[in-house]
Amino acid sequence: MVDDPLERLAALAGIEAGWIDFFGERRVVSDETKRAFLTAMGFDVASERAIAASFAEFETRSWRHRLPPVLVVSEEDGPPTVTVAVPVRKENQLHEWAVLEENGALHTGQWRPRDLPLVGRRDVDGEAVGQYRFLLPGVPLPGIHRLRVSDEEMAAMTLIVAPSRAHLPSAIERGQRLWGYATQLYALRSERNWGVGDFSDLADLAGRTASQGGAAVGFNPLHALFASRPERFSPYSPSSRTFLNIAFIDVEAVPDVRESAEAKRLLVSTGFQTRLAAARAAELVDYPAVAALKRPMLAACWQSFRKRHLAGDPDDRGADFRRFQQAGGRNLRLFATFEALQAEFLARDPTLGYWRAWPPTYHDPDGPGVRAFAETHGERIEFHIYLQWVADTQLRAAKAECDRVGMPIGLYRDLAVGIADDGAEAWANQSLLCLGVSVGAPPDPLNLSGQDWGLVPFNPLALRDAAYLPFLDVLEANMRHAGAMRLDHAMSLQRLYWVPQGAKADQGAYVRYPVDDLFRLTVLASRRQRCLIIGEDLGTVPEGFRERMVEKSILGYRLLVFEKDQGKARPAEVYPSQALVGFGTHDLPSLAGWWKGIDVEARRKLTLYPDPAMGDAEMLARAEDRRLLVEVLADAGLLEPTFPVDPEIEPDRLRKLAIAVHVFLARTPAKLLMVQFEDLLGMTSQMNLPGTVDQHPNWRLRYPLDIAAMLAEPDLTEIAAMLSRERDARADNPAQVSTAGGESESKE
């Protein structure tokens, strides 16, 4: 038994005492780190006496409340058992219970505590309290329900019932193995977009993908960033994960453009057209320039919309807007209020971007200062609701295009692991977050000091007290209009590496999350939204985590660049079936860049290696990886064994390599294959270079061709045809495969 009060409290709160680093060394978590984490979780640890009091209060919490805040169960486990705390003096008293299901069904009954199994008894504040197990007579349908227990007092809790496994598209259930394109929405070019890919481009890409046999289009997170700070454009450091990035609105597709005289005047003006042409021609996305084009146009659209569709009795469009506004509830209202407040304070002083720098009266989103601001700035707040409505409408139209062309999956969205601490979601949910810490990663060979991503995590204790509903809201918001969703850093369902504010990243620790509950909630959201879940399980994966994913029908992530076993590349047939496969990701080099070692050279140039010798070692390792890749492709009959492995590679040889790599991936049993345009087109660019901020054009690179030209490229269309034949043939008859040239051959 642990005697140290601080260590006991930390263990009870889920802070792990140590961890094994990449080099096999055990790192012991310091007391300073434990104190910082406990403080962020809401515990008083200012003194030994305070620590003892915090421990006593936390340990007896379940005895002080009649019911827990939430119980999450799986329907396959049978009738739920609820632990009820009742003063012993009431054990003979008749209690009534009621379960109100989400669908309106009501179930009621009665019991006396003395007739229930006794868990235990404890003296709490001078009174004997017993905990009793109450078994419901049946299993409610999957959903979010309310359980009430009452005698002369009433207590209530949230009861969540999850299905046994996540949603799988019917095509996958039938045994089909699907493929799709993975892209970065901002990188898409078209003749009509305004310098950044938009929702209309997404719909266009979906239709063209389906015509080539693709089942899905995957893209970077659509999370709301910072409308008043367009220079903040990382999709993985959002202001809110519940709402959408308005930079992706196709302004000319908004009906109000045609109705607004001001919008039409702006659009045809010489100065506007000059700036628009420059944004379209730019090699990199210029987010501030794009915002300067879109924002005044959308403001003009809003003014026209208010006058034409909201004045008096709202017409059909106005009524649709009001329904969206009402459905968004508190979350949407506070998000829009934050947007208006941040714009207000930045206009006064460019240093007032962070909400903690605002006057204290505006720190509390439900406080009188914010309410007063909302009353006097209602139109400005509604403007931001209008922007979200327009964005949602256009995303819904892209989803409708996927349905129209019969895509088995359609849109494949991405949910980032955290949020920026100075954004709307952090401001609106301060009690649910640990604002004194950030999410990161422990040291590894490329980051010997660890990583601090600057993202604020959910407080696992506060999240449970809130019945996990904020977590469920985030999940369902990112499954909206989607057929699949990628869960970035899926291990966050079980634990996250936190870093104390102001400390070095290697002074962090892992904090446990309620893994059983979070898995069940993810499954519930998946089934409610009919959305496939892909868990990004790369890196350090806790023991048993992947097995849990398989059990819950959540696809894992397998990348060719990492798949090795005993010093050899894994053959296609040993890849897991319940997985997404691909060559790489946005955080990794393209196929051509990987082969040439361009990523290693970039890190060398930017002195990202703590020791220059590490760059030399990685370049040698890359040479060996090229040899292993050729070996496994040759064994599969997709390349000749004499294929040169030197880093310089001419276009014809690169094309042959790209075909072989993707046919190899298509032959795996994996349910889904995602293909990156960079890999098919021989691009050497890397969309994001981890460890950099502005030294590399992260999240700004654009494709060299527009969508139509890109998907008409002969190499791309040839590989797409091969993928469709290969995956279709393997679904019906695993013995039927095709050579890199596309002809069928039978293999034993």
Image (cartoon, helix red, strand yellow):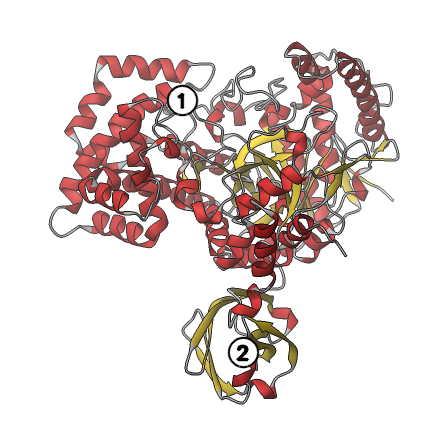
Which secondary structure lies at badge 2? strand
Residue 539 on image: x %, y %: 71, 37
Tell me whether circle 1 and circle 2 mark residues in contact (CB < 8 Å): no
Q: Given the current orientation, which residue lies at the most extreme left position?
A: 312
- Any part of residue 111 in sight: yes
Viewed as shown, does residue 494 lie left or right of 639? left
The label on residue 195 is none
Residue 673 visible here: no
- Vertical relation: 331 (above or below) 703: below
Q: Quadrant of residue 625 in the image? A: top right
Image quarter of the N terminus: bottom right
Give the residue type that dot 1 points to.
Answer: Tyr
Q: Give coordinates of residue 325: x percent, y percent.
A: 29, 50
The disc label shown at residue 86, or none = 2
Asked whether 683 or 654 is in front, the reply is: 683
Q: Residues within 10 Å of mark 2 (few under 14, many from 20)?
A: many
Distance from the alpha carbon under mark 1 to that under mark 2: 59 Å
* Element marked by disc 1: helix
Q: As drawn, is 673 to the left or to the right of 456? A: right
Q: Which residue is mark 1?
A: 287
Horizontal and vertical percent position of residue 668: 74, 41
Q: Amino acid at mark 2?
A: Val
**In the figure, is residue 630 to the left or right of 606?**
right
Above or below, 713 against 564 in this view is above
What residue appears at the point 57 percent right and 34 percent down from the top-left corner?
Answer: 182
Q: Is residue 58 above or below residue 264?
A: below
Task: State which tag comes first along the sequence, 1 or 2.
Answer: 2
Between 430 and 687, the one lying in front of the other is 430
Q: Nearer the viewer, mark 1 or mark 2?
A: 2
